[in-house]
Structure formats: structure tokens, C-alpha cells
Image (cartoon, rainbow, N blue to C red):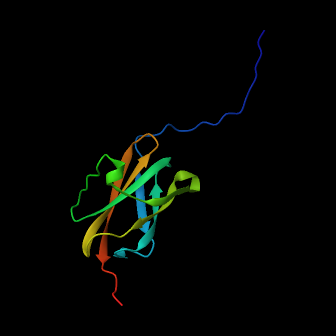
Amino acid sequence: RDNVRSKGVTLRAAQQGPPSISDFTIEGGTELTIGNTYPITITLSPSSDLADCFYAFDTETQHTFPGDAASKSQCTELLGNSDKTEYTAKLQASGSAGSFNLFIQVVDREGRDNVRSKGVTLRAAQQG
């Protein structure tokens, strides 16, 4: 004789490696005024549980982020939306005027990271 019983479960895909940034956009475009704070939207594919977001402006095409979080510029107000496929955050434009690559580094709760860059122009604030 046999007996059967059932229970509802949810199947989730395993995390596939580090978080992957499919795109990021800066509210207001790619011309940034030094000293201003800009909202950014980071799109991940697939979804990921981010713990942190850092950024850097660099003239090079590659940027190596230091391992120490305290020595990096951190995005503020990191917030996950749309089932963690989209995050919003804020960053401050800093440095000298010119053309740069803006590098965004995202870090998931397991410490895995990924970086994506986009060309931006930094402008000095208008005086007076």
C-alpha cells in the first residue's frame, strides 16, 4: 500500500555567477556638472541581490577598483526595484573638467562584483 501527499513549492534558478549589468543610465544625460548629485538607474540581467555600488571617473578604458570599500566612491541610496532587476542610486560628479569613462561597480551579497562603463563629460559649475 502507498500514500501520497503534496505541498506547494517555489523553484528558483541558482545564482549564475556575479551580477551582470546590462545597462545603466544617468538621469539628465552624460554631461555632468562637478559637485552635483545625479540619480542613476542600473539594469541587471538576470536579477541579483546587490549589497553595494561604487563608481569612478577615469580617462582610461579600464579601471581597477580597490578591494577596500573605504577607498572607493560609494553610490548612495541604493534601492532595488522590479524584483531586483533594476536598482536606483545616486552618485556625485567629482574631479576635473573633461571627458571621462564613468565606471559603475556593483557587488552582490556574496561579494561578487561586475563593472560597466559609459563615456561622460564633466563640466565645471557655472560661477555666478
- Looking at the rendering, which quadrant does residue 18 occupy? top left
Horizontal side of residue 77 vs 20, given as left or right: right
Q: From the top left corner, tell me how far across and down residue 60 is, in percent.
A: 21, 62
In the figure, is residue 40 to the left or right of 73?
A: right
In the image, taking residue 53 as reference, residue 7 lies left or right, namely: right
Where, quadrant-wise, is the N terminus in this rendering? top right
- Residue 115 position, x and y percent, is 34, 53
What residue is at 28 percent from the left and 65 percent from the top? 101
Looking at the image, which residue sits at the far top? 1
In the rendered view, tell whether residue 99 sits above or below residue 111.
below
Task: Give coordinates of residue 66: x percent, y percent.
Answer: 28, 49
- Which quadrant: the C terminus? bottom left
Identify the residue at horizontal 73%, vertical 29% (top origin).
7
Find the residue positioned furthest to the left: 60
Q: Residue at x 26, y 76 (%)?
A: 97
Residue 55: quarter of image:
bottom left
Return the residue nearer the eye: 59 or 119: 59
